[in-house]
Amino acid sequence: MKNRWIAVCCLAGCAAGALEAQSVIGPLVQFQTNMGNINVEMLPNTAPKTVANFLQYVNAGSYTNSIFHRSVTQGIFIIQGGGYQFVNNLPVAIAQNAPIVDEFHVSNVRGTLAMAQLSNQPNSATNEWFFNTADNSASLDTQGTNPGFAVFGQVADAASLAVMDSIQALPTYDLSGDSAWGGAFTNLPLQNYNGNPSQVTSANVVLVKAITQVVSGPQPKITSNGVIMASAFGGYQAAAPGTFIEIYGSDLAGTTRNWNGADFNGGAAPTELDKVTVMIGGQPGYVSYVSPTQVNAEVAAGVPVGGYVSVQVTYNGQPSEPVNLVMYATQGGILAPANFNVKGKQYVAAFHLDNTNVTNGSIPGVSGRPAARGETIVFYGLGFGPVNPQTVPYAGQIAEGQSTLVTPVQFQFGPNNLNGTMVYQGMAPGLTGLDQFDVTVPANSPTGDVALTVSQGGAPVGQTLFIPVQ
């Protein structure tokens, strides 16, 4: 088996929780953490002094390299920060401005951002804040006879909610007995902690690298029926985990480019590209191409199947309205770009083992030669589902080594459906999300432009394809 690189550009051509219904009425800020970004809409109409106080700390850089120092999952569900910067691997208290008056008006429901206060002292908030990771209204909307904790922001999109939840999911540790840390750190969320407080580094804490105001632009808009599976692989109005989708609309991005090697991290594909993120079925997609009118993304492996899922694009902190897309467990498609359609006949994109194209010369600008009887040639596809061994990822990661599709695929040639010999069918090594099929053409195959039928589990894919054989 021999793999070759296909340029990814050939693919170009619903909130997760209940928030109070509010329009975007204030600035958008972005919490840039080492676990992902959280976009938050400020609420100056309901908490003007609280918003102004928070932005004063933001503009002063007080929250730069600060940490989430508290995560609580008993009684209330919050993640708290704003109190300490992380300097030389130790917490340093952030200087406090004068306390502000409590402006409680909005309920402490999931996804809201509120100011921390001293117990039963409603006008004591200074620099610390917390995210409500669940509906805490029963506990935090009142403090005895005093008003509740002042909400001054709400998480802006589903991708940000996912980051918030991932922070809450971290294990917490009590470092209050360590003299270098102190009593405030009874529920400190940490990553990969080895149990030694003196060895905690920025790789262990949840670091807020910066909080910045986002310059908002027009809201991204996805056109009606504007989401399809990659057009070069069938362009279906449905997709499957591991497939690439194309999203069409307006104001979807501010740049035009494909992902490149620098966007990958240890083989992992990016979930954000030039301030563009895509949520598919409540999970971040892997963004492979951005432009103002088209965004492409790969569907994560764990997206629910068997019905409609929501698709939402967020650019520069501005989320689009979600649209629905049918998601199946498999939705196979074979690489057959639009420029391989000649006079209404759709030729498949196939390759000889010497990397040249399989063609009869009729495709403009594409040189090569037809396939020969008995020759092994290479095809690429999307959406044929998971592989064995299960350690080989079929979404969001550069594939390494060989694998085998869980549900076999068959290639048949000509009107008599002669079976090709499947030499290899699995993830394409060195590529992201693509299936590779090494197929030997039957020795008794017809010649000329031969009809090619591709099926999985006995069901043919929804493409009518031809391959030249000599």
Image: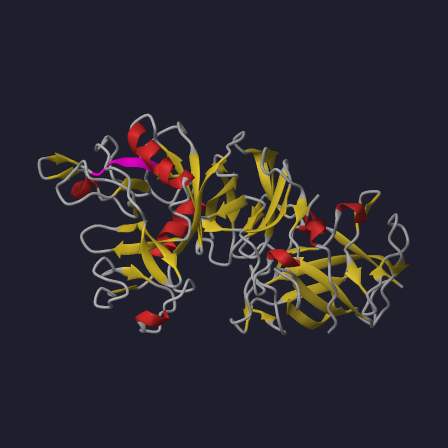
The x and y percentages for residue 322 are 48, 38
Foreground residue among 219 and 245: 219
Locate residue 198: give its quadrant: bottom left
At x 50%, y 59%, the residue is: 301
Q: In the rendered image of this protein, does residue 218 appear above or below residue 296?
A: above
Q: Position of 21 compared to 266: left or right?
A: left
The x and y percentages for residue 416 are 76, 62
Display coloring: secondary structure
Locate the C terminus and report the quarter of the image it occupies: bottom right
The x and y percentages for residue 105 are 24, 30
Q: Position of 394 compared to 102: left or right?
A: right
Q: Is residue 434 visible?
A: yes
What type of secondary structure mainly makes up the magenta span? strand
Q: Position of 395 compared to 355: left or right?
A: left
At x 61%, y 60%, the residue is: 433
Residue farthest top in this picture? 45
Foreground residue among 87 and 221: 87
Q: In the rendered image of this protein, does residue 95 appear above or below residue 359?
A: above
Foreground residue among 44 and 127: 127
Locate the N terminus and report the quarter of the image it occupies: bottom right
The x and y percentages for residue 114 are 28, 40
Locate residue 91: give its quadrant: bottom left
Magenta span has 151? yes
At x 39%, y 59%, the residue is: 87
Foreground residue among 170 and 121: 121
At x 24%, y 55%, the residue is: 73
Q: Report the span colored magenta.
A: 149-153
